[in-house]
């Protein structure tokens, strides 16, 4: 497990958040260069989660991380869904569990699965709780698709 100071992780988060906002419209970016989009999203997600999981709860650094990703959606509302996946994994779990629809938008699920895979591939350290959460999400997507 690689441990970096929270201040350094915040700087990385700022850098990747800026790069992420530069891709333009999310749907267009995904259709033209999905791999680049997912890589940038995964980096923002990785550093955001590192800060909120390792900074003291409700500390200045904790709030700064939230502020940085909030600014992403302010700068580009097309990223709302992607940022929501970062900040509300429990909400996402609830939505998956309560989904009773007979029709499934496989494109949306495919994008979510690819983003989880990209997140795993770009991890600098393996947090067992986070890996368990990702594994659970992938199993839920598998159930939906079946």
Image: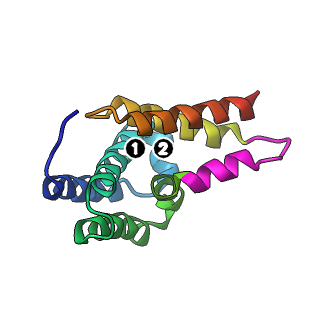
Distance between the Cα atoms at labels 2 and 1?
6 Å
In the image, what residue occupies the spot 21% across and 58% down?
10
For marks 2 and 1, the one nearer the N-term is 2
Give the extent of the magenta segment: 90-104
Residue 100 covered by magenta stretch: yes
In the image, what residue occupies the spot 46% across and 58% down?
87
Q: How is the image coloured?
A: rainbow
In the image, what residue occupies the spot 49% across and 34% down?
132
Neighbourhood count class around disc 2 (C-alpha, 10 Å): few under 14, some 14–19, many 20 upward: some
Q: Nearer the viewer, residue 34 or 46?
A: 46
Residue under pointer 1: 37
Neighbourhood count class around disc 1 (C-alpha, 10 Å): few under 14, some 14–19, many 20 upward: many
Q: How many marks?
A: 2
Q: Nearer the viewer, residue 113 or 92?
A: 92
Measured as percent of width and height from the top left, residue 92 is found at 60, 51
Q: Does 2 sit left or right of 117 as displayed?
A: left
Above or below: residue 49 compared with residue 57: above
Q: Quadrant of the N terminus?
A: top left
Q: Are marks 2 and 1 in contact (CB under 8 Å)?
A: yes
Residue under pointer 2: 30
Q: Does 105 sit left or right of 37 as displayed?
A: right
- Quadrant assignment, res 57: bottom left
Measured as percent of width and height from the top left, residue 134 is found at 50, 36
Above or below: residue 23 compared with residue 124: below
- Quadrant assignment, res 136: top right
Say which element carries label 2.
Answer: helix
Measured as percent of width and height from the top left, residue 135 is found at 53, 31
């Amino acid at each position: 497990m690689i441990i970096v100071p929270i201040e350094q992780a915040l700087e990385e988060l700022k850098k990747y958040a800026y790069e992420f906002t530069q891709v333009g419209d999310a749907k267009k970016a995904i259709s033209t260069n999905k791999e680049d989009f997912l890589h940038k999203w995964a980096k923002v997600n990785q550093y955001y989660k590192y800060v909120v999981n390792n900074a003291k709860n409700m500390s200045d650094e904790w709030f700064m991380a939230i502020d940085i990703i909030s600014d992403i959606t302010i700068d580009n509302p097309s990223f709302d869904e992607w940022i929501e996946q970062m900040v509300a994994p429990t909400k996402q779990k609830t939505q998956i569990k309560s989904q009773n629809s007979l029709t499934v938008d496989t494109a949306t699920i495919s994008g979510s699965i690819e983003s989880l895979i990209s997140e795993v591939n770009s991890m600098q350290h393996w947090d067992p709780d986070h890996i368990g959460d990702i594994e659970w999400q992938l199993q839920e997507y598998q159930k939906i698709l079946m």
